[in-house]
Every structure is written in C-alpha cells, then in structure tokens.
Image (tube, rainbow, N blue to C red):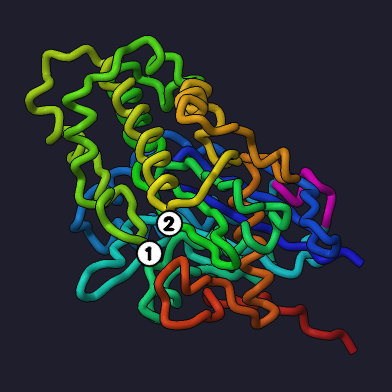
Amino acid sequence: MAELYIGLMSGTSVDGIDAGLIDFSHSKPKLIAFECTAFPNALKEKIKQLSSHHALLLKDYGALDCQLGHVFADAVNQLLKKSGIAASEIIAIGSHGQTLFHEPNNSRPFSLQIGDPNIIVEKTNITTVADFRRRDIAANGQGAPLAPAFHQAVFTSLNQSSCVVNIGGIANITLKSNQQLIAFDTGVGNTLMDYWCQKHLNKAYDDHGNWAKSGAVIPKLLQLFKQADYFQLPAPKSTGKEYFSTQWLENHLTDFSDCNANDIQATLCQLTAESIADAIQNTRQDIDELLICGGGVHNHYLLSLLTGFGYQVNSTKTVGIHPDHVEAIAFAWLAKQTINHNTGNLPDVTGANRAVILGGIYPKTNPKPSY
C-alpha cells in the first residue's frame, strides 16, 4: 500500500518552489511526481527585499506570509493535477517555508520561515507539517542543517570515503566518521554568484558557470573573502544570507572597484569551491567522492573546480535520487517523521541537547459524516 507525502522546498536562492510527491512504502523513497514553480518576478523581489532588511513593517510581513501560503498551496494542487492522485490519498505535506531570517547564535536565537500553513491545509485539504527549525533551536540547536538526517536514513550506501555536498544559496556537507555523522554549513554557495550575475548581466544565475569561467581569480580578494570569521568556527554551525549578504560582498569590494566583473564572479566561484574543500579537509576524513545535489550541480565550472581538489565528483543520482529532488524529498521525509512521532534532528549535527520531534502539525478537517 502506498505511503504518500508531499515535500515543499523554497531555498535561499529564491528561485522558486520545488514540490515532490513521494511514496515511502518502498525501501527507498520513490518519486511519483515533481514540479518546480518559479516565483513571479514581483514576488521574488518582495522576498529578497524583506529578507535583506533587519526591520520591516508588520503588515508587509503578514501579507507576504499569506501570499506565500497561497503560492505553496497552488504548487501542491498543480502537482496533484499533474500526477492524477487525489488529495485524500496524501498523508501529509512537509513545507519548509521561505526563510526570512536565520539567527541561531543570538542571545535570543531564532529562525523564521514563512508561508502560512493554515492556508496550505485549507486550500489543499491535506494535513500540513511546517516550522521544522524552531524546535531544534528550542533544544539549543542551530536549527540547521536538517537534511543530513535524511541523508543518513536514505543514502544507506554512503561510505566513509563519500561526502554529500548540497550547494544551494548556502552550501553544506554530510559525511561519515566511523559511526558518527558530520554535517554543517560550509558557507556561501550560489547566493552571491547569483546576485553578482543579476547585477551585471541581468540574469538570475550564471548558466553552467560560463561567466565565471571567462574570468580570472583575484588572489587578494579571495584571501580577503576567506578571512571571514565563519570559516574559522567549529561545527556545529549554520549560516545564511544574514552573514554572507550582498552588503558583505559589497563591503569587501571597496578596494576592487577597478576589477572586471567576470573576474569577481570567478573569485566568488572559487570561494564556494575552496570553502567546501577546506571544510571537508578540516574534518580530517579521507574523502574521495563528492555527491552533489542542489542548484550548484548545474554549475559545471564549479564542479570542475571541486574536481581540481582531487575529488571524484558525481551527482546524488548515482545513489538513487536526482540532485534537483533531494531537498523536496527530505522535507516530505521530515513530515513523515513528525506524523509518526519520530525525531527529525541529529544532535551531533545541529548541536541540540537531544533529538526532538520537529515542526507543527496542521490537521486537515474531515468532512462531516452523512447519516
């Protein structure tokens, strides 16, 4: 009998919503249908504007929370239409939400994801699980990364010499050390390259990394980037656009205003590659293979840079899951954990005091029985 869940993921790159319909009745998750819905430009700009300011009007926050709830619900309904599966057959939706701010190291730590789950459950009539990160933070964890628990459960063939590398707006790694899992955010992924590309080429991203490939790395700028405090912190650790912000980038470029834009793009791409490689090397594990997932898998130049560090670079497709689908499936899996009253975090990864059940459950309303 099928065990169907839907996972919704909208990451820090703000490129759109990944929606996956997954059957968990098999030994490995089976993807039934997948849909990627791009954000309309106006909504994308609104998300970027609100997430880049430390202060905002409550009415703007509330309106965006509502609007994203409708957009997420529409993505689910479109996915169901595409698959031909009725909403009544879905056990639950796992909605990550759109991160506005992630601040796990404050004296009052928090992580804020929006996209009203009340609207999602009302528009889909499917039980919805949301707000996954704050329970881990309440247990003194970072609230991130959460996908490594899924990596451990699903990539059972992951061995001591392999490392899963998720390259979204922020990059993170997952690897094994004896019986322990090591996982953390390595730093910037695509987000600053996307910003620089949008600013100078009016394009959302650097297609295959061709623009970066056309430039030359600026050694002094690269070293300046790598002096960031975050790179020196021990794990557990997590980060986001709050640290590696567009302002952080612009501040570092003050003395490099005469440099070619493509050279700066090449340097940003090198930063992503080196920060990933440095993080892996600092774990002191003998890693031979990188299994890439997330949007960065399409940046062929970035992958070639990672290969240059001596790694065999493959996508997670080689271990059974398409790299574009991993995070949506992960949040469907986290919803399944919550619905079944199972924990979803890994304390060794997030730094939490203990393993906890993540998220809040918003139950669907069953129709009144007819007598």
Q: Which mark is residue 110?
A: none
Between 116 and 243, the one nearer to me in the picture? 243
> Where residue 164 sits: x, y (%)?
57, 47
Residue assigned mark 1: 236
Neighbours of disc 1 within 10 Å: few (<14), some (14-19), many (20+): some
- Residue at 57%, 58% (x, y): give it: 176
> Where residue 122 sits: x, y (%)?
61, 68
Between 336 and 19, the one nearer to me in the picture? 336
Task: Tell me which amino acid carries mark 1.
Answer: Pro
Between 200 and 86, the one nearer to me in the picture? 200
Label 1 secondary element: loop
User: In the rendered view, does 131 fall on the left or right side of 271?
Assistant: right
Residue assigned mark 2: 184
Q: Which residues are magenta?
A: 79-85
User: Does residue 37 lie above or below 332 as drawn?
Assistant: above
Q: Is residue 142 magenta?
A: no
Report how far apart the C-alphas of labels 1 and 2 lie in the structure: 6 Å
Dots 1 and 2: beta carbons under 8 Å?
Answer: yes
